[in-house]
Image (cartoon, helix red, strand yellow):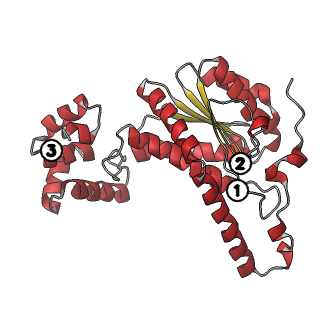
Amino acid sequence: MPRAIRYDRLPTERANRSSARLDRLSARAIAALMNREDARAVRAVGREARAIGAAVDLIVRALAARGRLIFVGAGTSGRLGVLEAAECPPTFGTPPRLVQAVMAGGRASVFRSREGAEDDGRAAARAMRARARAGDVVVGVSASGVTPFVREALAAARGLGARTVLVACNPDRARLPRANVVIAPAPGPEVLAGSTRLKAGTAQKLVLNMISTIAMVRLGKTFGNLMVDVVATNDKLRARVRRIVALASGAPADRVDTALEEAGGDGKVAIVALVAGVDAPTARKRLDVAGGNVREALGS
């Protein structure tokens, strides 16, 4: 039986002395204050680099072995997980099943707050039994670190043989749920006491950005700092693919357009064809052998 949660002791619930006169300040002064406090969140995340690296290593091993990455959370934390999962397919060309999100209260809670859903640990366990399996990595996202939905989701995931990561803005690790890796930036009390969509949300978003981006880089989803797996579904993204191919290959615009046409719009095929001096079918075969990794397909 888990201990009763002492919410008054949570760092995410404390009042911030710096903003005690918040309602007496001008809009400009509040903006400056919030900016200073946001900088604390950035520094706090920086101090968690080692744990972030460990989480990424865990995720890369899982995805390389056909596992999935599943974010779990409630409220703002859950929505951040949903956002991360939604952005991976267009940015890195991943199938939707590879990176998923589970939100307390279900899909409707993404758009309309259902705060009571975060206390439903049984629903979390059911969701994990329906989604997670051995070989997956489940990332629990919780500002306080003690949200029952996240706590029970991590416990259920462990029971299914999945590896687990916790992202929480609570440095009191002894009070946090068990996980293989704990990432616990401490941005301090919110400008608006208890409003964890502010600094805590910023810190969590920074961490999730790092987790997904670094994992995809390590899996060969980029070439240098270019997102060569971007899915070109509109004019802006088609123009981006042309720029990426031009930057990666150094080829002039007319050769880039020809290569992309011969590659059926596939930026990676066009890059390999241009850089290696081969035709599109040969470039595609090289990429298939290299598991889609452009650098390996080029032999460097």
> 253 or 60: nearer the eye?
60
**Which image quadrant for residue 94?**
top left
Residue denoted by label 3? 273
The Cα atoms of the two marked residues, 3 and 1, are separated by: 47 Å
Question: Above or below — where is 236 with respect to 220?
Answer: below
Quadrant location of the N terminus?
top right
What residue is shown with label 2? Answer: 169
The image position of residue 25, as x and y in percent, is 81, 79
Determine the image quadrant of residue 175: top right
Q: Percent position (x, y) of residue 227?
A: 36, 50
Relative to 168, residue 177 above or below? above
Disc number placed over residue 187 in the picture, else none: 1
Q: Amino acid at mark 2?
A: Cys
Q: In the rendered structure, which amino acid carries the disc numbered 1?
A: Pro
| Vertical order, 22 against 249 (above or below) | below
Visible in this render: residue 264? yes
Confirm or deny contact between disc 1 and disc 2 (CB under 8 A): yes
Q: Who comes first in sequence, dot 3 or dot 2? A: 2
Q: Is residue 178 left or right of residue 136?
A: right
The crowding category of the residue bearing disc 1, from other C-alpha atoms within 10 Å (few below 14, some 14 to 19, many at least 20), is many
In space, the residues marked 1 and 2 are separated at their CA atoms by 7 Å
Residue appearing at x 65%, y 24% in the figure: 157
Label 3 amino acid?
Answer: Ala
Residue visible at 64% across and 55% down in the picture = 44
